[in-house]
Image (cartoon, rainbow, N blue to C red):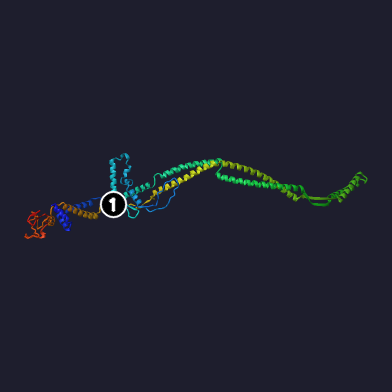
Amino acid sequence: MQTAITNVSKGGLTPRAVVEALFRQKQLFFWMASLILVATVLATFLKHRQYSSEMKFLVLNSRGNVVITPGRTTSANVASDVSETQVNSELEILHSHDVLDPVADPDWARVPENQRTPVAIRRHERRISAFERRFGTEIVRKTNIINVNVVADTPEMARLDLENLSAGYLAEHRRLQRPSGESDFFKSEAERIRTGWDKASQDLVEFQQQHQIVSLPERETVLNAQITEHERDLLATDASLHELDARQAASSTRLHDLPMRQTTVETVMPNQQSAQTLNTLLVELENKRTALLTNFKSSDRFVAELDQQIATTKAALNEATVSTSRAKSTDVDPAWQQLHTSYVQTEINRRQAMAHRASAAAELAALRQDLANTQKLTIQFNNLEAQANQAKQNYELYSQKRDEAQIEDAMDEQKLINVAVAQQPTLSYVAVAPKPVSNAILGAVTSLFLALCAVYLAESGRNTIATPRELDGASRYPVLATIPRISLWEGRIFERPRDTGFQLPALPSPASVDEASLSSSHTVLNPWGEANA
């Protein structure tokens, strides 16, 4: 019989064979398909409704990763295209445990290390696995966009999971993109260097106050300029003194030869005042004599004395009338006066020039001494100034680094990173699972497929011959007739023999033959009248 089955299998799978197999295994086909459909319906209506929330991440090259160096940072603002490697790297970060663990099991981070028992770890891993089944990512083809969706029992829970996932992912991206502690490091270093700069500046200021200098090179320049100016002043003063000495010598010689005064007016005039006075005195004397003659004789002593006075007065009057007086007016010679004034002014100027020269010489000596002392302080001042300048440059450098790090932190806080949220988590009240129509179609297809598979397996495991065609293919003898098996409760049914020479009772109509009689086994007669089952 095994040989017969093998021969039948060689004939191939024909539609007729499929239909015959279905009729033979119709109960198995029906119950298998019904079971799958019922299971699909139960799974569809008993399963909790699931809601989905979706968001999109856009991978950019808007910010480059700045290399941390002790020198000044020169940023190259060149944004290149995003490679497939970068997008896949971001996708792996999304699926990392550092991102998923706080979302799938928020309480795990608060569990102390000593309380993380194997049971708690297994429970945590189950929660992670359950969340990973609800979590899905997809890279949109030929784009830099990553689609992320989460399925949950409620729309709010799905969106909340995505919001937590987005926050954790962006935080993890910032942590990986920039080293931790950069801002604090540069801040502490800047503060330390600023303290050193303050000390160096204080030392420099104390040195400047002690020696009364602001800038040593500038002071040396000023002193050199002042020394040069005083030297020029001394030379000019010496030349002026030589000129003044020569002028004074010439003025002295000229004053010695030139008289001081000269006659300006000479007047000759009579002595009118004396004559008038004498005339008045003479008249008085004559009147007095006339008065005496009334009382005395002309020979009397008083009259003789009076006559003598009158004669003397007349003689004086005559002499005054004859004599003249000369009046001369003299004045200082203008040439002498001008020359003397010039001499005196020259002397004054010479004394001023001498005093100015002495003062300039003293100032020049003081400036030269100050320059010498300043030059002695050059090394010490330069060292202090170099220390202060170096500390200032270092502070400016680390201040720049600190500000850059703080700017980076601020940009990270504002989510200005290479990954941007292109679409915020959605809130949809349309359930994504279960889907009755899709599940019905899928259940129907699955039930048909599994039922056909069951029929195929049943037919493959069958070790009987069900049709004359199978017997004809498996036997070495030609098939003369087939007799269907008659059930006791169905009555007798005869089938007309095929290709035989004897007569059999007429076959019943096809309507009277049920499907069970067609799918039952047959008794077959070979040409020699032997019956084969």
Q: Residue furthest front?
A: 476
Q: Is residue 112 left or right of residue 357?
A: left
Q: Is residue 52 visible?
A: yes
Q: Mark 1: which amino acid?
A: Tyr
The percent coordinates of residue 7 (x first, y second) are 15, 54
Judging depth in this view, the residue of 78 and 213 nearest the camera is 78
Q: Is residue 528 left or right of residue 258?
A: left
| Mark 1 residue element | strand
Q: Which residue is mark 1?
A: 51
Mark 1: few/some/many CA within 10 Å (<14, 14-19, 20+):
many
The percent coordinates of residue 344 (x first, y second) are 71, 47
The percent coordinates of residue 325 (x first, y second) are 83, 50
Exactly how many numbered labels are in the figure? 1
Q: Is residue 466 left or right of residue 366?
A: left
The percent coordinates of residue 167 (x first, y second) are 35, 48
Q: Is residue 421 visible?
A: no
Residue ID at (60%, 42%): 368
Q: Residue furthest top?
A: 114
Q: Is residue 360 left or right of residue 97?
A: right
Judging depth in this view, the residue of 279 and 388 nearest the camera is 388
